[in-house]
Image (cartoon, coloured by chain):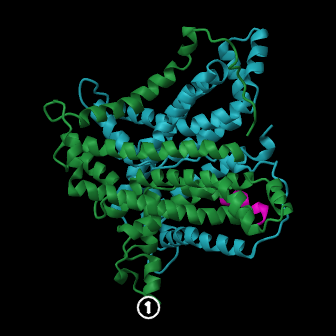
Amino acid sequence: MVIGRAGGAQRPPRFRPGRWLGVLPFFAFTGMFLIAPVLRMVSRSLQDDDGNFTLDNYRSLADDQIVQAYSGSVRLSLLTALIGCVIGFFLAWALSIGGLPRWLRTPVVTFAAMASNFAGVPLAVAFMFTLGGNGILTTWLELAGFDLYSTGFALHKFVGLALVYAFFQIPLMVLVLLPAFDGLKKDWREAAENLGATPRQYWRHVAFPILLPSLLGTFLLLFGNAFGAYATAQVLTGGSGTPLATLLIGQQISGDVLNNQGLGMAVAVGMLIIMSFAILFYSVLQRRSERWLG
Amino acid sequence: MTILNAPTPSSLAPDEVIEAPVRRVHPLAWLILIGIGLYFFVPLILTFWWSLRAEKDILGFEAYGRLFADANFWSSLAETVVDSIATIVLSLLIIVPTAFWVTLRLPKLRPAVEFVTLLPFVIPPVVLVLGILRLYARPPLLLTSTYGSSRLVLICIYAAISFPYMFRSVDTGLRAIDVRSLTEAAQTLGAGWATILGRVILPNIRVALLSGSLLTFAIVFGEYAIAVYMAQHTFGPFMANLTRSKVYEPAAMAIVAVAIVWVAMVMISYVTRPRDRR
């Protein structure tokens, strides 16, 4: 990161409307394609079918089908964020502090960038051929005497989805965490050692606390990443099977399954609220970690 | 949904400031790398293997031949490529002047712009398309009446989704150069805004522009949720349909998709390699 930004903030403020024209296209465009649709969903979620104000749609969120969808999404996102964090942490550690040869980095980081962008149809397909009912690995395991599907495993169920989601969660963690590991200064370790700290104490009292905001922030980012994922789950489940909030919204778009447009909007707004919390705290924690690791 | 973390120049190319540590490989490091590597490579390798088995008892590229003979493959691919290029151009046209202007004249507005560029992370694609359809698929603002107009709306949504990546990329590029001095020097020499942007600023941040564009391509390519509900015949919906109707072709298609995204990522890694940075 380059320190010191161009542009002088110190000048006395003077109101010049011409200046604002420069950012007008940006705000107009995002207003039209990001903000307005959200506001429309919020306003519709507060109306009944005749357009009168109501909170009924939000009361109806307590419906079983909806609670299950939210809870499925939250649990899947928490689990895969945790998997991503733990495994991503070890991989980032192995690549930086673990001392793996430097030439490995570029291919691993490039692969991680690819894999973290790989969510969607091709990812679902790759796992179907591997661990689906007729998947190659499934068949091999069966030949080896282990019938995976007799354990209740299926790609379209909770554990199966989690296994697939890990494919884009772990790489994202590595991409975020690797620069953080690199930011751990050698001086800090030496200072700790000079003061008589054992490696364990160095990790416990120096490195880990510095990495913690970054870890927590990334956990939330991964949570949001899984929470909003749609295509992967859609292809694996065929749109139903495992209740997830995004799948419910998909069904709502294609056929108003809830028989209530306003309720569908309320489900969407509920997702936005959960996402806002995740991304807000992610961004706060990320800023905090940049203080040390920037 | 696709993801965040733009492999920005800084995350792809480890800073040269890292002091060379004592290179002592921890015994667990290789074990971790190989164990995790297996999880990632087994599905890809087995999918590739499956894609070679379309002909009975022979390994061959039959599935690829059938995939490439499918007219829908080429039409959806072409449509996606055109849409991606349009998205990239639109995104650059909006983000570059905005990032430039915010850096130069409105630094106080930076938090607001950063906040707005974060919105696509908060709004899942399937939720966004629900709102878009609610707003623009019915009067009085009917923008999706024809296939072509829906396509334009799709491109605009993709551009908006690319903002977090594009803004971060361009912003990183702009911070690495002294925008103010360059602009003032150009103005002293009599350059107008178009000349300043086109001939002074852009050439200096071309690496950032290129990596932002490639990343946008990787995100748009294969996007499914929005395209399918906008009834667009792009690559994402094509792949999903193929999965439902064919046995071996989807494997070939997954490998082709991996290869395309992989090429985009290798290009990013190449253009942002350390010696290009000043």
By secondary structure, the bulk of the magenta-drawn segment is best described as helix
Residue A66, how many percent across, how many down? 25, 54
Residue A37, picture quadrant? top left
| Image quarter in which the C terminus of chain B is found | top right
Shown colour of chain A: green
Q: Which residue is mark 1?
A: A145
Residue A111, how many percent across, how many down? 62, 58
Residue A107 lies in the magenta stretch = yes
Is B25 placed above or below B170 here?
below
Residue A98 seen in the current view: no
Instruction: Name the residue at 76% across, 68% down.
Output: A199
Residue A209, picture quadrant? bottom right
Residue B216, how many percent across, how many down? 55, 41
Query: Under tag 1, what secondary structure?
Result: loop
Dot 1 amino acid type = Gly
Is B49 placed above or below A85 here?
below
Shown colour of chain B: cyan
Q: Please name whichever residue, A27 or A191, is drawn nearer the observer in this view of the structure.
A: A191
Instruction: Name the residue at 48% across, 24% down.
Output: A27
> From which residue to which does the magenta span run?
A99-108
Q: Residues within 10 Å of mark 1 (few under 14, many from 20)?
A: few
